[in-house]
Image (spheres, rainbow, N blue to C red):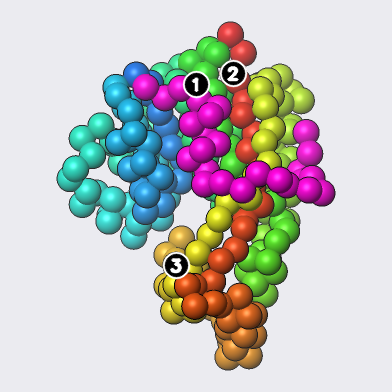
């Protein structure tokens, strides 16, 4: 397993990656850290017979998700990966989209054990994590350096594989396109997220704005976020 590679040649939305790796129809799917439920919606509406349990720890995001009325096959609940409110061996697929590094460091190993507990024998865990590289990361790290937690997330996955909790099916690297209409859009989607308190002093704020606007064009600011996906299987 590698935390990063030198050259990533695949540029695509993440939907293309998980749809290539996984068959999701007629499955019980668990999403850990569903955020604003955008990916949840894509998964829930793209196939047949999909039952989704979507968990989130951010109370503000969770309350908004509870207002969603057009996803009858999705159950939203507030809970973290370290204490999943589901029965043993009850889930076919677990998703973590860029959320493992948000789990407290001392709870990452427990979270991996919880994922194993709820997965059926032979079930799959899809864990995607941003690679600590790229132009967007260089802006992010000005006010929120995630190198330590991203390394810890990778180590937690590798430790779980090395211990035999899971087998590694495939490790995939790709670049996910990102677009912001303007710095105001970036500020709303990144600086003002409710799951993390980003407090920037005036000097840092202006530096972030300057670095961001270097990427601004007539049709917005475009970035490629390098992402690693570890697809794991619980042993039979």
Residue at the (62%, 85%) spot, across then down = 210
Distance between mark 2 and mark 3 Cα atoms: 35 Å
Q: Is residue 158 above or below residue 235?
A: below
Task: Examine the image and state in which quarter residue 141 appears.
Answer: bottom right
Q: Is residue 64 above or below residue 136?
A: above
Mark 2 = which residue? 234
The answer to the question of whether label 2 and label 3 lie on touching residues, with beta carbons closer than 8 A, is: no
Give the image location of residue 126, x and y in percent: 56, 32
Q: Secondary structure at mark 3?
A: helix
Residue 234 covered by magenta stretch: no
Residue at the (25%, 32%) spot, across then down = 73
Magenta extent: 1-25
Mark 1 = which residue? 119
Mark 3 = which residue? 189
Q: Name, please, the residue furthest toward the front.
A: 218
Quadrant for the C terminus, please: top right
Q: Secondary structure at mark 2?
A: loop
Task: Examine the image and state in which quarter residue 204 appears.
Answer: bottom right
Between label 1 and label 3, give the one nearer the viewer. Answer: 3
Residue 154 as seen in the image, left or right of residue 186:
right
Residue 13 covered by magenta stretch: yes
Q: Most prominent secondary structure in the magenta stretch?
A: loop
Q: Name, please, the residue furthest toward the bottom.
A: 202
Q: Secondary structure at mark 1?
A: strand
The answer to the question of whether label 2 and label 1 lie on touching residues, with beta carbons closer than 8 A, is: yes
């Amino acid at each position: 397993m590698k935390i990063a590679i030198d050259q990533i040649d695949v540029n695509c939305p993440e939907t293309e990656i998980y749809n290539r790796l996984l068959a999701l129809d007629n499955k019980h799917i668990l999403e850990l850290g569903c955020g604003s439920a955008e990916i949840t919606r894509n998964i829930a509406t793209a196939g047949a017979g999909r039952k989704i349990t979507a968990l989130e720890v951010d109370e503000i995001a969770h309350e908004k998700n509870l207002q969603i009325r057009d996803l009858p096959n999705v159950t939203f609940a507030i809970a973290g990966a370290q204490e999943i409110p589901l029965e043993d061996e009850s889930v076919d697929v677990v998703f973590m989209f860029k959320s493992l590094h948000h789990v407290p460091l001392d709870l990452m190993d427990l979270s991996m054990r919880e994922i194993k507990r709820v997965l059926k024998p032979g079930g799959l865990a899809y864990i995607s994590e941003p690679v600590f590289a790229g132009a967007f990361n260089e802006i992010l790290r000005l006010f929120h350096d995630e190198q330590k937690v991203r390394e810890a997330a990778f180590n937690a996955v590798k430790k779980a594989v090395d211990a035999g909790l899971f087998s590694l099916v495939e490790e995939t690297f790709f670049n996910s396109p990102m677009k912001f209409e303007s710095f105001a859009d970036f500020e709303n989607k990144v600086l003002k997220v409710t799951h993390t308190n980003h407090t920037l002093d005036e000097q840092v704020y202006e530096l972030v704005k300057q670095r961001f606007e270097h990427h601004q064009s007539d049709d917005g600011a475009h970035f490629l976020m390098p992402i690693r996906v570890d697809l794991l299987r619980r042993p039979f």
